[in-house]
Image (cartoon, rainbow, N blue to C red):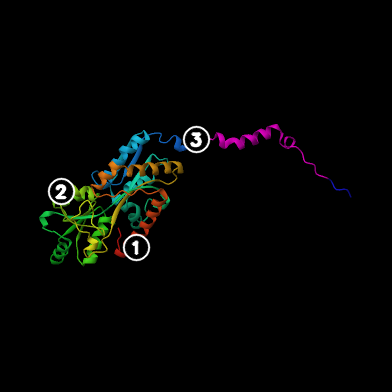
Amino acid sequence: MMKRSLERRPALDVLGWKGLRAMVFMLALPLFAAPGLAATYPERSVDIILPYGPGGTGDVIARLVSEKLALDLGKPVVVLNKPGAAGVIGATAAARAKPDGHTLLLGYTSEIVISPYLVKDAAYEVGRDFVPIAMAGSTPLLLVANPKLNLASIDQVVERAKAKPGVLSYATAGVGSPADIAGRLLEKSAGINLINVPYKGGSQATTDVVAGVASMYFAGMPPAVPFIKSGQLVPLGVTSKTRSPTLPDVPALASEGFPSLDLSGWFGFFAPAGLDPEIMDMLSRKINHIMDDAEVKEKLQSLGVVTEPMAQADFARFVAAEQKKYAALIKDLNISY
């Protein structure tokens, strides 16, 4: 039996001219591909949602960044204050926005790594609904008191609280906020009871301590420092292991017999999940450049904020580590809504 031989046929015979032209076109597509979304971004104004009211630490950061980012992008950058529920209201609004880079969230420790563990059936999950963009800065909390109370140190707070239980109060920005956690840690480590007075944001909490409505507040440094300089608030300590260069005469509470009070609040920029990677990378680089700007660094450091530019991947790892840290604190302090 003879074996049939298979002859090779020229490509033209197999494909035909039309087929060959189609193949060449497909192979050439990458050379003529339309530019990425980053090339046309932004197409309109960019909103930075801040989940707190005007005047606080986040508001200072947001407005400094918005001004310089607008110049860089060539489009308006608008700060939208959406306070309430320890940052959850603003974060929820940001999570529901289109992932096109035109809505960013300046998130704080509260709504990013604390509230998601406290709110049942929360409207957002950080890992699912957001992508970290850039670290903005961190600051230790600053324990301040109304001067009429004649409290000059953390030890005097403990003595007064033990002598008159349930009289001294501390303001917070809501259940589970860093100020709330710091107050609970103080109560637990010192064996005292304080009255918890919640607010929607740090600005109102600060002014109410000035007015004597609340006794004390673990404040962010930017809104509190001007009141300290004017004598309207008395600084009792910062929640860190070392003193802050902004207020070098104020003791570090962690080194004053309260090691658990080593907490720093931080702010970072996030975008709704699904953002184009090129736009994400662009925004990360631009915001990091702004945070490293000498004028911005000087302004924020004068208020006690340490700017810490991080690559996008490094910031994502930082957020994951903070989530684990605060999950353990919430469980240990038995915090719940």
Q: Residue at x 37, y 49 (%)?
A: 310
Q: Label 2 belongs to which residue?
A: 229
Residue 217 % position (x, y) = 20, 55
- Residue 146: image quadrant is bottom left
Crowding at mark 3 (Cα within 10 Å: few <14, some 14-19, many 20+): few
Question: Where does residue 245 sit, x and y in percent of width and height?
Answer: 23, 52
Which of the pair 34/300 is nearer the observer?
Answer: 300
Q: Quadrant of residue 159?
A: bottom left
Q: Which residues are magenta?
A: 5-33
Amino acid at the residue labelled 1: Ala
Q: CA distance from mark 3 to mark 2?
A: 53 Å
| Amino acid type, label 2 | Lys
Gap in angstroms between the C-alphas marked 1 and 2: 36 Å
Left or right: where 302 falls relative to 151: right
Crowd band around label 1 with a 10 angstrom C-alpha radius: few (<14), some (14–19), many (20+) = few
- Mark 2, secondary structure of its residue: helix
The mark that comes first in sequence, 1 or 2, is: 2
- Residue under circle 3? 35
Label 3: which secondary element: loop
* Main secondary structure type of the part rendered in magenta: helix
Q: SS class of the residue under badge 1?
A: helix
Residue at horizontal 23%, vertical 63%? 255
Relative depth, front residue between 295 and 147 = 295
* Residue that numbered label 1 is attached to: 328
Q: Is residue 159 left or right of residue 315?
A: left
